[in-house]
Amino acid sequence: MYMPAIIDARHVRSYQVGPYLTMLFTDCKSAGQIQYRHVLFVYAPPDPRDPRPKPPSRIMAVAAERNPHLERVPDVPRNGYFLGVFPGEGHMNMGMSEDWYDLEKFAQKALEIVANQYMITIPPQLLPPIPPKRRWWQFWRKPSSAL
């Protein structure tokens, strides 16, 4: 599965989008050449039959990404980032904009892309902060039957 290669980032907040958990990160430290400013990771819903909670699998990501070589290209906006979508297999480039530099504009668009990908019509639900020293996936709500 192809996903953004980051080695460190700051967790900003989490949302539930239908049955999916999404986690928004910023200040990303990239593992490779492509630089990521923000990444929204999407996780598969937990299996309600599993008696032991365990980390869910990443199934999708949306990223504000930039190739550092573009800094030498004339007329490329200084704060311009590409909106990259990682639907599980492959990568789609949704175009460059300075909007993706802004965390709130990025988050709104990324959540919209996730909802469209999985045909979810209900608005995303902001989840409460994760308590320190707790496993983050244990605070995920069970999938709603109202989908």
Image: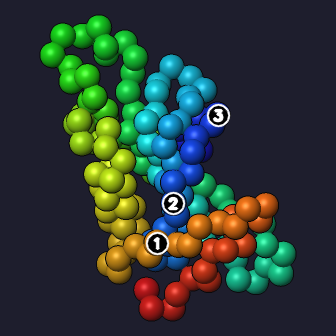
Q: Secondary structure at mark 1?
A: strand
Residue 142 in view, yes or no? yes
Q: Secondary structure at mark 2?
A: strand
Name the residue type under label 3.
Ile
Name the residue type under label 1.
Leu
**Crowding at label 2, few (<14), some or many (≥20) Cα neighbours within 10 Å?**
some
Q: Position of residue 124 (x, y in %)?
A: 40, 73
Question: Which residue is disc 2 drawn over?
Answer: 13
Question: Which residue is disc 3 drawn over?
Answer: 7
Q: Position of residue 16 (x, y in %)?
A: 50, 72
Q: Nearer the viewer, residue 116 or 111?
A: 111
Vertical position of residue 34 compared to residue 52: above or below: above
In what quadrant of the picture does the C terminus appear? bottom left
**Crowding at label 1, few (<14), some or many (≥20) Cα neighbours within 10 Å?**
few
Q: Position of residue 130 (x, y in %)?
A: 65, 66
Q: Earlier in the sequence, mark 3 or mark 2?
A: 3
Proximity of marks 3 and 1: CB atoms separated by less than 8 Å: no
Question: Which residue is disc 1 drawn over?
Answer: 126
Proximity of marks 3 and 2: CB atoms separated by less than 8 Å: no
Q: Which dot, 3 or 1, sits closer to the camera?
A: 1
Vertical position of residue 47 compared to residue 137: above or below: below
For the residues labelled 1 and 2, the Cα–Cα distance comes to: 8 Å
Q: Position of residue 24 (x, y in %)?
A: 49, 54
In what quadrant of the picture does the N terminus appear? top right
Name the residue type under label 2.
Arg
Q: Which dot, 3 or 2, sits closer to the camera?
A: 2
Question: In percent of the image, x 38 and y 39: which residue is there?
Answer: 64
Q: Earlier in the sequence, mark 3 or mark 1?
A: 3
What sort of colour scheme is used for the picture? Answer: rainbow
Residue located farthest toward the front when viewing the structure as drawn: 132
Question: In percent of the image, x 76 and y 83: which residue is there?
Answer: 49
Vertical position of residue 142 compared to residue 100: above or below: below
